[in-house]
Image (tube, rainbow, N blue to C red):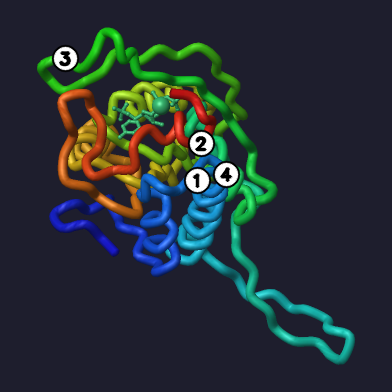
Amino acid sequence: MPIEDRDNAYLITHALAKDTLSRLRDIETEQVAFRKGLVKLGRICGYEIIDGAMETEYVSIETPLQETTGERVKGLDDVVIINVLRAATPFVEGLLKAFPRAKQGVISAGRDEEAGMNDAGEFPITIDYVKLPEIRAKDTVIVADPMLATGSTMCAVLDHVLANAVEQPTDLFVLSAVSAPDGLLRVDEEYPNADLLTVAIDDYLDDDGYIVPGLGDAGDRAFRTT
Ligand SMILES: O=P(O)(O)OC[C@H]1O[C@H](OP(=O)(O)OP(=O)(O)O)[C@H](O)[C@@H]1O
Ligand SMILES: O=c1cc[nH]c(=O)[nH]1
Ligand SMILES: [Mg+2]
């Protein structure tokens, strides 16, 4: 469903996506259930991307009984999924169930929480490790991170990914579970060619840059760190 006044931002409205996200938000959801919830949400989002954004083609098929016409999704071999370490890891595990043959990239990008947010609402981002596949124009690129807060991490990641692409991808998706309005606007403004997909847009960011109501620190809850 398109988000008001934004040509390229969409809500993933599948009932099971909303159900799963609601369980993730719950403070009572402990590590294992939280991680499994992120995996499930990634899978649902993957199916929704296929359903909403990928083309199908008719193919001739020989069943054990006779020839018939079937429908196949086009381009499944030309999918690139970027895992923004570390909170995206279980989310990507779910996405891979929808895109099992995706080429995968990882990029370790973290907010410098000690430096904190500046007056413009941005965090300095540290990028430690990057391993990306070759990206070409025909690839469907999905950059996955469950949390889009100030947008600082995603902008740093997109900078890196696009600067290192062999060709600029035509289909570029930024996928998150929960977004703050500020982060969504920032990524939209800096990367107008990206389609932004999210399951929820929450109310605001608190003074520490956490999404409210949000679900807390997704990395800490999935990896049981504090
Ligand atoms: O939009 P932003 O303000 O940049 O915030 C979002 C980022 O914060 C979280 O990662 P974090 O830095 O906590 O790293 P982690 O995945 O290791 O927990 C989250 O997974 C995003 O990457
Ligand atoms: O609310 C937030 C903001 C950034 N990162 C998280 O994990 N949660
Ligand atoms: Mg974290």
Residue 15: x, y in percent?
A: 39, 69
Residue at label 4?
Answer: 32
Q: What residue is drawn where x is 46% and y is 39%?
A: 144
SS class, disc 4: helix
Residue at label 1?
Answer: 34
What is the CA distance from the residue labelled 1 to the residue labelled 3?
31 Å
Question: Quick check: 51 above or below 103?
Answer: below
What is the CA distance from the residue labelled 2 to the residue labelled 3?
27 Å
The image's mark for residue 222 is 2
The image's mark for residue 150 is none
What is the CA distance from the residue labelled 4 to the residue labelled 2?
7 Å
Residue at label 3?
Answer: 118
Q: Quadrant of residue 174?
A: top left
Instruction: Give the amino acid type for the residue marked by disc 2 in the picture.
Output: Ala
Q: What residue is drawn where x is 52% and y is 23%?
A: 107
Viewed as shown, does residue 82 lie left or right of 218?
A: right
Image quarter (top left, top right, bottom left or bottom right) of the C terminus? top left
Within the displayed image, which quadrant is ligand 2 positioned in?
top left
Viewed as shown, does residue 20 lie left or right of 189?
A: right
